[in-house]
C-alpha cells in the first residue's frame, strides 16, 4: 500500500520540483507589489497565482502569497533567498519561501471515533492530500488495523489527565524523531498542555464538532440537541491554549430538525467534520493560511 | 395599495373557506391516529396533509398536524369541535382547530434598520405572506414613508429603558385594540419586559442576527468579526424572558472570509436575516409550528 | 473484517426484529388513513413514523409509508399480511410489507474510478449503510485489493460494447446466485441492455456526474467546463432504458469558478457524487422511495 | 424618493472620487505584474485590491483587475491613461481604466412578473446597488405604480414577435437618449434581435429561470416538474444571439421535493432568481466581470 502512495508522492514531487510559494506580510505601504514582482521577474520566476490582502489600505497590515515557477529552482533557491534579503529589509517584511516538493510530514492524533482519520486516509490514498503521513498516535487501539494496513506506524499511548506530562513527553519524542511539520487532531479527545502547544505553534490543527463559538468544550451535540438548534456544524482551527478559541480556518454546517435526536445529529455532524477538517488541512499543506492575531487569512 | 392586497386576501379566503388544520399533542399511546382519522372520515373530512412526530414511540409525547377539507365547513365547525371532545378526552389531548380563512392579524415592530420590515412588506404585497398586517410600531420615524404608502398605520413610540413600562402600556393598548394575533420583532432593538412577553406567550417572533447560541446579545456582527468566524448567521425564535434563549424556529448562515469587515458582514447578514425571518413567519401563519418545552416542532 | 461488519449487522437485526414498513399506493379517496390505522391498531402495531402524499387530494394518487413495531412480529407476519388483504381489496391498493431485519443484498458495479465504491464501503464499515454487500463486479482490476481486504468477493468481468450480451449473462448469473436485491452502479461506465434493466426493474441505482437533465451522456465535466457553468452537480437515479432519463432520487451541486479546470471540476465533483449516491442508497435501503411514473416520492 | 437615493449616490461618488479600476488582458508572459505595479507605484497609486488569473501560465491568456486610489485622480486621469500607453503597447494589452465615481446608467426591462424588478429596486433603495436606474421599459403596465413612485420613468411599449423591429427601434432610441450603460432583463419575456444584441454587446444581463444548460427556452419550471428534479435553479448571463447560451455570470439552486408542484416551484425559484440576478448585476457594476470567449472571469 505504502509503495502505491509513495509513487504518487514521487510523481507529485517531480511535477512540482520547480515550483515555490512566497509568503509575505508587512506594514502596508506603496511599492510592495512593484518591488516583489520586479524581483521575481528579474530572477526569471513565472508567477502562477497571486493573492493579496490588506487589513486597511491606509496603514494596515499587508499580506501576499505568490506561487511561482523557476527553471532549475533547486540550484537557484539559495541565491534567490539571499537576493531577496534586500527587498525584505527595504519593507521590513516577514517573508518565507516554501518549496512545493518538500512534502510536509504529518502526524495524526485520534481517540475512539475514526471517521475523521478515515477521511484523511481516504483523501491521502486518492492522492488529494499531499502529505507524508508519518505516524498515527492514539490513546485507543481502535484504529490500529486501518492504519497499519496502509503501512503507517501506529503508536498506542494511553492517556488521561493525571499522566498528561509523561504522555506528552513520549508524544513529543516521537514527533521530533519523525521530524513532524504538522499535527492533526482528528477527534483526539485529550487536552494538550501549554508546553505542547508552544512547542508546535500554529502547527496543530483541530476539528471541533460545533460551529464555534457555539458549544465550546465537551458534548456539543448533546447541547445542540437540548438547545433545539436547526443547524449543527463543525470548525477546524489552530490550537492555542484557550480551549476551542484558536484561529478558525474553516467551518461548515448541516441542517437538522426536530426528528433528529443526539445520535442522528452525531451521524450528520460526522459528515461535516470530515469535510471541514479535510479542507482545512489541504489549505495548510498548500501554504494558503496565514495566522494573523487570532484570525486566519486563507488565500 | 391596500385595496390591491385586500383583493388577494379575499381571494385566498374564498379558496380556503372549507379548509382547516387540527393540531394535537398528547402522551404517545396506541390508537391515536386510528381514532382521529376515523373521526375525520365519519365527518366527511378529506385529509390534505398529515404530519406526525413522537419524542419517543415508547412513552413519549405525540404530535400531529392534519390539514383537511370539509364541505360547508363554516356551518359544521361548531358541531365538529363539539363532537371531537369525545376523542380529545379519551386520549387526554391538547387539540386545536384552526380555520385557514381566519387570517392572522400581525403587528410588526421595527427600530432603525428596515431590511426585515421591507422583506415582509414585499412578501405581503406579492401574496406570499397571508396575514393582515394591521400596524407597524417603531421607536424611530425612519420607516414611516414605506409603511404608510401601503396603507398600513404607523405608530411612532419613542422608547428607551427608562420609560419601558409606559412604552409597553401604549403598545399593549394598540395591540389589543387591533386584536393582534402575532407580533414580529423585525430588528426591534428594545428589550421587552416579562409582563409583555407573558401577555403574548408564543406569539412574539424575533430575528436575531447570529446563529444562536453563538453571539447572544448585542453587536453579534462585531463579535463575529473579532472572533474570525467563517460563517455568519441569523436565528428566528419565539421570545421568552431569557434573552435570545427562546424556542428556535429557523436558522441559516452565509459564508464570509477574511476580506469581509464588520460592514460587509452586516450586508451579507441582512440577506440571511430577511429570508430566515420570512420563513419562520410563514410557518407560524400556516400553523406549522408547535412549541414543546424550549424547542419547536416544525411540520 | 467481514466478521466485524457481521456483528454490526446481527446487532441491527436483533434491535429491529419487531419492526416493519407498510408501503401503499392507491387512488386517493376518503377513509384510507382511517382504515389502515384502525387495522394496525387492532393488530397491536405501534406506529413509529408515518408519511403520506397525494398527487391531488381531489382524485389523485395517494401514497403512504408507515413504519411500525409489533410484538413477536415474526410469528405474526403471515397472519398480518393475510388479514390486510381485506383492506387492500376495499381500496384497490398496491401494498407491500417490508421487514426491517431482512437486510437487502447489494451488488456494486464499478469501473476504474473508485471514489463512489470507497465511500459506500466506508459507510458500510461504520454501520451507516445497512446492507449485505454480497459482491463487487468490475470491468477493471483496480479496486480488487480494497474490496477483497474487506472479505467481499470481487469479480473481474472485462466488458465492452461488442461482448455486452455475454458479459451481462455472466453478471445476471452471479446476481441470481447471490440473490441480489439492489444493484448500485458506482461509476460503472458501461451501458446496460434493455434485457438487463428489465430483469432488475427499479432495483438499479446509478450515479451520474452532472445535475441532470444538464449534460446527459458522456464527459459531463468536460462539457460543463466548456459551457462555463458556475455550479457542477451529481444525480442519483433508477436506471431505465433511456440513458440518464430514469426517475431521479437525489441531486446536489457544488460551486466552481473560472479557476477550476476540468481536473479540478472532477475532484470537486467526486465529493458531490459520493454523498449523493450514499444518500440515495440509504433511502432505498430504508424503503423510503416510491417510484411513480418517471418520478420518485422520497418519504 | 428619488432625492433620497440621489443623496446616497452623491455620498458614494464623493467617497470614491479618487478610486479607479484597471482591467487588463493579454497573452501571458513574464513581467506583466512587475511592469503594471511599477507603473502604478511611480504614479503614486495605492493598490486596494488585485486579482489575476491565467488560463495557462505557459502561454495562455492573462487577466488582471486592480482597484487603486490616487490623490487628485480627476486631474491626473488623462495623463495616467496617456502614460499607460507605453505599458499597454509593450505587452500588447487590452486595458481599460474605470472610474468608480462614474456611476453606470441602467435600464431595466420587465414583463409581467415583477419579483426581479422589485428586488433590484429594493437593493437600490438600500444603497447596495450603486447604479443610476434611468428608466424601466415594459411590455405590460403591471409595474408602473412601483416604479413611478420611486421617481423612475416607466415606458410601456407593447411587444410581440410581429412588431419586434418597431419595438426595438423605440427601445434603442430611449436607451441612447438616456445614454444607458447596462441593460437588465429582469424577466423580460421577449426575444431580442441580433441587431439589438450587437448594439449593446456584453451590456445586456439576463436572468433565466433554470440552472442552465438544463431547460433552455420556455417554461423551465413546468419541464423541471415533469422531469422530477430535486433541485431547481436560476442563471444570470450576458445575452448573445444564441438563446440562453451566453456567458454565465452566476447560478444558484434551491431544493424541491415531490410535494412541490409547478406553482410551488415557481415561488421557490423566484427567490433564487432574485438573488442570482442581484449578485450578477453588482459584480458587473463593480467591473468585476471579464467576458472571455463564451465564459466569464469573475474577480
Image: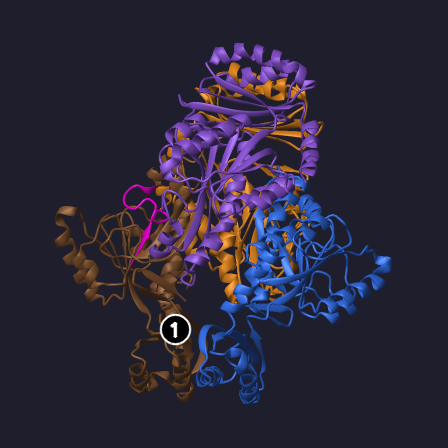
Chain colours: A purple, B brown, C blue, D orange
Which residue is painted at 47% across and 78% down in the image? C70
Q: Quarter of the image containing the C terminus of chain D?
A: top right
State the image coordinates of residue B24 (x, y, percent, origin top left).
34, 74
Q: Is the residue marked by circle 1 packed among few (<14), some (14-19), or many (20+) residues within 10 Å?
A: many
Residue B293 percent across, percent down from the top left: 29, 63
Residue placed most toward the observer, C290 or A134: A134
Res. D33 in view: yes
* Image quadrant assignment for residue A120: top right
Residue B131's place in the image compared with A29, above or below, is below
Q: Is residue B207 magenta?
A: yes
Q: Which residue is mark 1?
A: B64
Provide residue B50's location: percent of width, then percent of height: 44, 74
Left or right of A242, for residue C294: right
The answer to which quarter of the image holds residue C26 is bottom right
Magenta stretch, residue numbers:
B205-220
Determine if the magenta segment contains residue C155. Answer: no
Amino acid at each position: 500500500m505504502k509503495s502505491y502512495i509513495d509513487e504518487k508522492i514521487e510523481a507529485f514531487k517531480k511535477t512540482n520540483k520547480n515550483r515555490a510559494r512566497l509568503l509575505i506580510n508587512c506594514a502596508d505601504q506603496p511599492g510592495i507589489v512593484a518591488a516583489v514582482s520586479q524581483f521575481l521577474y528579474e530572477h526569471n520566476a513565472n508567477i502562477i497565482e497571486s493573492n493579496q490582502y490588506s487589513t486597511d489600505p491606509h496603514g494596515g497590515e499587508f499580506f501576499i502569497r505568490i506561487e511561482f515557477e523557476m527553471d532549475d529552482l533547486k540550484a537557484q533557491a539559495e541565491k534567490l533567498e539571499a537576493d531577496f534579503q534586500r527587498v525584505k529589509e527595504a519593507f521590513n517584511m516577514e517573508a518565507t519561501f516554501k518549496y512545493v516538493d518538500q512534502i510536509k510530514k504529518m502526524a495524526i492524533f485520534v481517540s475512539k471515533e475514526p471517521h475523521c482519520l478515515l477521511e484523511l486516509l481516504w483523501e491521502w490514498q486518492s492522492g488529494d492530500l499531499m502529505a507524508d503521513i508519518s505516524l498515527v498516535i492514539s490513546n485507543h487501539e481502535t484504529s490500529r488495523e486501518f492504519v497499519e494496513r496502509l503501512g503507517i506506524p501506529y503508536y498506542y499511548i494511553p492517556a488521561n489527565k493525571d499522566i498528561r506530562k509523561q504522555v506528552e513527553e513520549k508524544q513529543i519524542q516521537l514527533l521530533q524523531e519523525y521530524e513532524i511539520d504538522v499535527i492533526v487532531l482528528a477527534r483526539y479527545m485529550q487536552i494538550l498542555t501549554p508546553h505542547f502547544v508552544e512547542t508546535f505553534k500554529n502547527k496543530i490543527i483541530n476539528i471541533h464538532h460545533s460551529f464555534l463559538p457555539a458549544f465550546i468544550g465537551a458534548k456539543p451535540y448533546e447541547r445542540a440537541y437540548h438547545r433545539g438548534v436547526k443547524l449543527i456544524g463543525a470548525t477546524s482551527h489552530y490550537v492555542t491554549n484557550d480551549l476551542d478559541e484558536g484561529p478558525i480556518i474553516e467551518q461548515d454546517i448541516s441542517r437538522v430538525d426536530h426528528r433528529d435526536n443526539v445520535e442522528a445529529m452525531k451521524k450528520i455532524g460526522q459528515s461535516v467534520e470530515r469535510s471541514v477538517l479535510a479542507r482545512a488541512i489541504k489549505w495548510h499543506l498548500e501554504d494558503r493560511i496565514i495566522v494573523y492575531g487570532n484570525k486566519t487569512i486563507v488565500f
